[in-house]
Amino acid sequence: MADGTYRFQQPVAGQFYFQQQTQQHNHPNTHQRHLARNGTGSPTGRLKFNTDTPSPSRSPPLNQSPGHNPYNMYSQGQHVMMSGQGHQRFGMPMQKFQHPSHHPHHAQQHPHHQHPHSQTSHSAIGHQHNFSSGTLSSTAPHFTPTHIPNGTTTNVDEEIEEPMNEHWQQQLQLAAESRQANSPHYYARSVAQQTKGIHLTSNQADTNGTEDRSLAKTTKALSRRQDWMALDFGGQGLRAISTGLFHYTFLEKLYLNHNKLKTLPPTIGQLKSLTHLDVSGNELTELPEEIGMLIHLKKLLLFDNNLHSLPYEMGYLYQLDTLGIEGNPLNDVFKSRIMQEGTKALITYLKEEMPVNLPPSERDWVILDDSNRDSSKGQNEKFTALSYNTLCDRSATHQQHGYAPSRALAWEYRKDLILNEIKGYNADIVCLQEIDQGSYHGFFREQLAYNDYKGVYWPKGRAQGMPEEEAKVVDGCATFFKGSKYILLEKNMIHFGQTAVRRPDAKGQDDIYNRLWQKDNIAVVTYLENRLSGERLIVVNVHLYWDPAYKDVKLIQAAILMEEVTQLAEKYSKIPACTDKTAFRFSEPGNSTDGDGAATPVEPAPSVQYSSGSQIPLIICGDFNSYPGSAVYDLMSRGRLIEDHPDLEKRLYGNLSRLGMSYPFNLKSAYGAIGELEFTNYTPDFVEVIDYIWYTSNALQVTGLLGDVDKHYLQRVPGFPNYHFPSDHLAIMAEFSFKSKKGKVVEVDFGPQRDRDRDRDRDRDRDRDRDRDRDRDRDRDRAT
């Protein structure tokens, strides 16, 4: 067996020597030569093969004896510090194939050693050496069950502190790693070292025409700026940060660690794409409230600062996985919670205990035309319309709105806020989306009746055939109008999916059944007449499908909507005039019509008649789930859908996709006069305009609009709903006036004098024509 230095030496080949212990044992024969060792320790317990090893029949030199090597074949002594003081185990020389139980005289004859550097009981336990037993694993331990290997008795368990859980262990580990990263640009250098020599290749793979929608959002985000999305200013000794840094809103990682920053500017809240922020090793004494705007943060490292507290706005950081606070004199309430329950528990605590801030200033009312504003006639010719997606209770979940406190998300709180907002605006017409049946019948219809509102409601299509209790939670569209001002002439509901499958051209169109019919979105159409002026008005309340992946469905829903409204308008134009338009009046002391102080009722004007549906004033309110510039927006504003529109993605929807469609109304967005609002839907992941009020510009004119939300307030609010805004949508509101109708021009008869003047003008024109003809003939003769 030529195993070189790995072969255990037999007794005939030389004497075996035990390893020298660091403590003094009571052995009379202590070999001084044990101090001389030339072998290099191997953490694996094995040496590299020595090519100079002599023949196996020869004994190796004394300095190569395995008895002198702490990592020899049988010693198994590990050089790694595990937990304890300087105990060592002794390798046992054994004959080949000899069982270790044949050597009882080596079992446990060594006395226990007391170390001079005595420690407290709890620290002694934390410093025991751990050695694998090697070939002596079958023997009994050299300590009794009442002793720990380092000599500490087991009765110290009562004095041991509670062991650290995984949350605090992670804190300490990350803090140690952070303290090692104190060199300039540590993370940038690490990344550069890791990517050194790596050749980047295109990540575009052949998908055989298939579409991976899971990557759509990521690809869109990276397309904005793909060259770099991280900055490392670590270890620079910075005392201040330029505000220009916070214009790089595409940044995903920012390292400001190991500087001398005392504060962070509030403008850091602009970096809403950040997922990793490291400000460890600075001199921060507080964090700005705007830190809560970094809603996509997953790792926030604050190690080794001087933070005594944390802003409650950090409760908005519902996606935060790691919050590093070790090395800060943080108050016990925050520190104990993160130590015991982790980052998520602390963030939830901050969110739920967040105090209610001051409400924003009221939204401005933008006046576009103030003519006839104070006259009674002008008021009768004007009306206001409000559109509001209220976020039904079933959609207000913590999974979708994890940044919202539980109380602000609760329907019992939000419904009162919505009701007060509607009453405050006091619009003549109110169009609500995402109102479930239970809330409409059990709350809004009853409460708004006290403010002179009457309502029309339909739930979405899936409520049909459901049990009554289950149908109560299905949302739909509700239209309210002032009962003292308007008469309800007609009401209808448009179910887009059912309407599509009933079309004669739907046969064989699979996309109608597979994509459109499965969506149960609806629109509610009401036909109203003003009691006093006689003007009639079509009000449409609509909610289109939400998913961006179904833009073809939304486009077809909008096209079906306009086709159906066109047909209904023609039907409404044939409705005869109203004969009884007097509003019901309660008999109350102040409403008596007898005596001198009686109020004279205004005589209602006759109903206005329309020769065609396109002449009837029309407003369309709702949540279109489409932003300006989208196909739905273009359809509503331009009046036609072109055939084979790109958003249809070559799907088959009958004549709508093959021939296109158009409608006779000239629609405009109410906010188009001043530009659309900054947003109508406000969440951390989506800030866009998707709610509109469309109107026919040939019959109506916009005179006022509800403005934007206070921008200063939004600097510390990452999304709605919250304590002041009960929905993720904004209420939008517009004031309209009816345009005066163009009648036939009637000429006025001024008597004989006008006839004489007309004859004189005719004679003068005739003489002028005759002179022109004579001059033309003369010029022709001269030319010939």
Image (tube, rainbow, N blue to C red):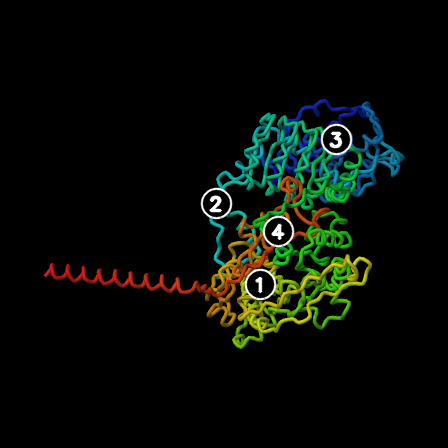
Tag nearer the camera, 3 or 4: 4
Of badges 4 and 1, nearer the viewer stands 4
Verify CB contact (< 8 Å) between mark 1 and mark 2: no
Between the C-alphas of marks 1 and 2, the distance is 57 Å
| Residue at figure coordinates x 65%, y 34% from the top left | 177
For marks 3 and 1, give the CA distance: 60 Å
Q: Along the polypeptide, which appears first: circle 1 or circle 2?
A: 2
Task: List the residue tagged with mark 2.
Answer: 200
Q: Nearer the viewer, residue 688 or 85?
A: 688
Q: What residue would you read off at disc 4?
A: 373
Residue type indicated by callout 3: His
SS at badge 3: loop
Q: Residue 663, image x and y in percent? A: 51, 67
Circle 4: is it few (<14), some (14-19), or many (20+) Cα within 10 Å?
Answer: some
Q: Earlier in the sequence, mark 3 or mark 1?
A: 3
Q: Quadrant of the N terminus?
A: top right
Mark 2 or mark 3, which has the lower sequence index?
2
In front: label 2 or label 3? 3
Q: CA distance from mark 2 to mark 4?
A: 67 Å
Label 1 CA crowd tier, 10 Å (few <14, some 14–19, many 20+): many
The secondary structure type at the circle numbered 4 is loop
Q: Which mark is residue 618?
A: 1
Decide: few, some or many residues near mark 3? Use Cα within 10 Å; few <14, some 14-19, many ≥20.
Answer: some
Q: As rendered, which of 123 and 378 lies closer to the eye?
A: 378
From the top left corner, tell me how far across and down residue 392 is, in percent: 71, 58
Q: What amino acid is at disc 1?
A: Leu
Circle 3 is placed at which residue position?
A: 308
